[in-house]
Image (cartoon, rainbow, N blue to C red):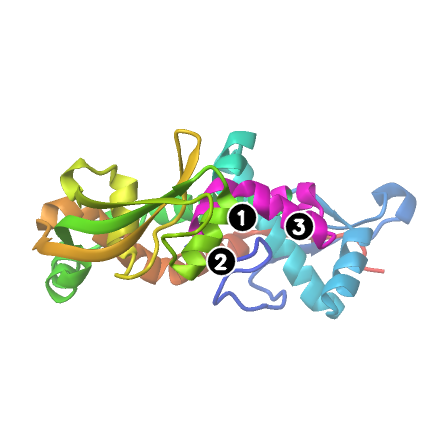
C-alpha cells in the first residue's frame, strides 16, 4: 500500500468547509465551552488544536479546520472499525523493514541512536502507519466484490510474466553469525569475505516457504534476496539463474490480481469514502477565536 498520512489521503485535497456540512453555530462564554472550537459528530476540537495546526502546518484558519475535521473523521473510523495494533505487530513490521533493507533491527536501532533519533518515536510512527494501512484495507475490502471478473482475467492475460515462477533457482547461499559482515559481503558480492560462508545450491521452488518464494520471484538475477534469520544465523541468497518458468493457473493467482486491481483503485475508493463521511458530518461551531 502506498504511503499516506492520517491527515490526508492522495489525491484527497484540502476542501474548505461549505454548506455541504451540517454546520450549526452556537456561541457561548469561553468558561462554558472550556476552550472548545467546534465538534465533529460530537467529538470536541479545542482552540489549542486549531492554533497548533495553523502554526505546525503553516496554513490559515479555514485550512486548519479542514485538516482537523479530516483527522477526526479518520480517528472515528478507526474506533468504529475497532482497529488495534499490538506491540508484536510493531516488532514484526520493524523486522520486515529490516529484511527489505537487507539489514537487521539492531543496525536500524544503532543507526537511529547515532543520528539522534528517538527509538520510541520511531515505533510510534510505525504504529501510526500500521493503523493507517489497516484502516484503508478495511475501507477497500467492501469494494472487492464489485470488481468485474472480466477485468481480472484480462489483467492475467496481459501480464503473464508476473505470474510465471521458475521450477528451480540456482543460488549462492551467503550466511554468517555476523550481520554486518554479511552485509559487507553482499555489497562486495564476495565469497571470500571474513566470517561469511557460502554454498552453491539449486532450490526447488515447490519446497520453499511461500513468503520466501515470493521474495525469490521478485529478486532479479545477480542480486541478493533480503536477509533471513535462520537458526541463529543471518542468511541471504544471490540469485544466479531461474530455470523453466511456468505460468501459474489463473485461479491460483486470482486473489493476487484482485489485490493489484484494488491497489490501483485504492486512492479513489478512500477519497470517495471520506467525501461521503464529510458530507454527512455534523459540525457544531462553538468559537474560533
Report the residue marked by disc 3: 112
- Residue 146, how many percent across, how many down? 24, 52
Observer-nearest of 73 and 144: 144
- Residue 62, how many percent across, how many down? 70, 67
* Other-residue count near label 1 (Cα within 10 Å), few / some / many at <14 / 14–19 / ≥20: some
Identify the element where label 2 is drawn.
Answer: loop
Q: Is residue 105 magenta?
A: yes
Q: Main secondary structure of the magenta part?
A: helix
Left or right of 254, for residue 71: right
Observer-nearest of 34 and 108: 108
Viewer can see residue 285: yes
Q: Are marks 2 and 1 in contact (CB under 8 Å)?
A: yes
Q: Nearer the viewer, mark 2 or mark 3?
A: 3
Left or right of 199, for residue 151: left
Left or right of 51, for residue 110: left
Report the residue marked by disc 1: 129
* Other-residue count near label 2 (Cα within 10 Å), few / some / many at <14 / 14–19 / ≥20: few
Identify the element where label 1 is drawn.
Answer: helix
Viewer can see residue 146: no
Q: Residue at x 44, y 30 (%)?
A: 232
Q: Is residue 275 magenta?
A: no
Residue 3 numbered mark, or none = 2
Residue span colored magenta: 94-123
- Residue 45, how many percent across, how many down? 73, 49
Could you tell which of marks 2 and 3 lies nearer the N-terminus? 2
- Residue 104, how many percent across, how many down? 51, 44
Could you tell which of marks 2 and 1 lies nearer the N-terminus? 2
Could you tell which of marks 1 and 3 lies nearer the N-terminus? 3
Residue 113 numbered mark, or none = none
Amino acid at each position: 500500500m502506498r504511503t499516506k498520512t492520517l491527515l490526508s489521503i492522495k489525491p484527497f485535497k484540502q476542501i474548505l468547509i461549505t454548506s455541504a456540512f451540517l454546520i450549526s453555530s452556537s456561541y457561548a462564554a469561553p468558561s462554558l465551552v472550556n476552550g472548545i472550537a467546534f465538534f465533529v459528530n460530537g467529538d470536541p476540537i479545542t482552540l489549542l488544536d486549531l492554533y497548533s495546526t495553523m502554526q505546525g502546518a503553516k496554513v490559515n484558519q479555514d485550512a486548519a479546520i479542514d485538516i482537523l475535521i479530516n483527522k477526526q473523521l479518520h480517528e472515528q473510523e478507526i474506533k468504529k472499525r475497532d482497529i488495534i495494533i499490538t506491540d508484536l505487530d510493531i516488532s514484526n513490521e520493524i523486522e520486515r523493514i529490516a529484511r527489505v533493507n537487507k539489514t537487521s533491527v539492531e543496525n536500524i536501532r544503532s543507526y537511529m541512536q547515532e543520528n539522534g533519533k528517538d527509538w520510541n518515536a520511531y515505533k510510534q510512527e510505525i504504529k501510526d502507519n500500521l493503523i493507517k494501512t489497516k484502516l484503508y484495507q478495511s475501507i477497500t475490502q467492501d469494494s472487492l466484490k464489485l470488481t468485474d471478473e472480466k477485468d481480472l482475467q484480462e489483467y492475467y492475460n496481459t501480464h503473464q510474466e508476473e505470474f510465471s515462477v521458475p521450477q528451480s533457482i540456482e543460488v549462492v547461499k551467503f550466511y554468517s553469525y555476523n550481520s554486518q559482515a554479511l552485509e559487507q559481503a553482499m555489497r562486495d558480492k564476495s565469497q571470500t569475505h571474513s566470517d561469511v560462508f557460502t554454498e552453491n545450491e539449486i532450490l526447488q521452488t515447490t519446497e520453499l516457504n511461500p513468503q520466501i518464494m515470493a521474495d525469490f520471484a521478485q529478486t532479479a538475477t545477480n542480486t541478493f534476496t533480503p536477509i533471513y534469520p535462520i537458526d541463529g544465523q543471518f542468511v541471504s541468497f544471490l540469485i544466479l539463474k531461474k530455470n523453466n518458468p511456468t505460468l501459474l493457473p489463473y485461479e491460483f493467482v486470482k486473489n493476487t490480481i484482485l489485490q493489484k486491481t484494488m491497489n490501483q483503485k485504492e486512492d479513489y475508493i478512500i477519497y470517495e469514502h471520506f467525501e461521503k463521511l464529510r458530507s454527512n458530518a455534523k459540525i457544531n461551531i462553538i468559537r474560533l477565536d
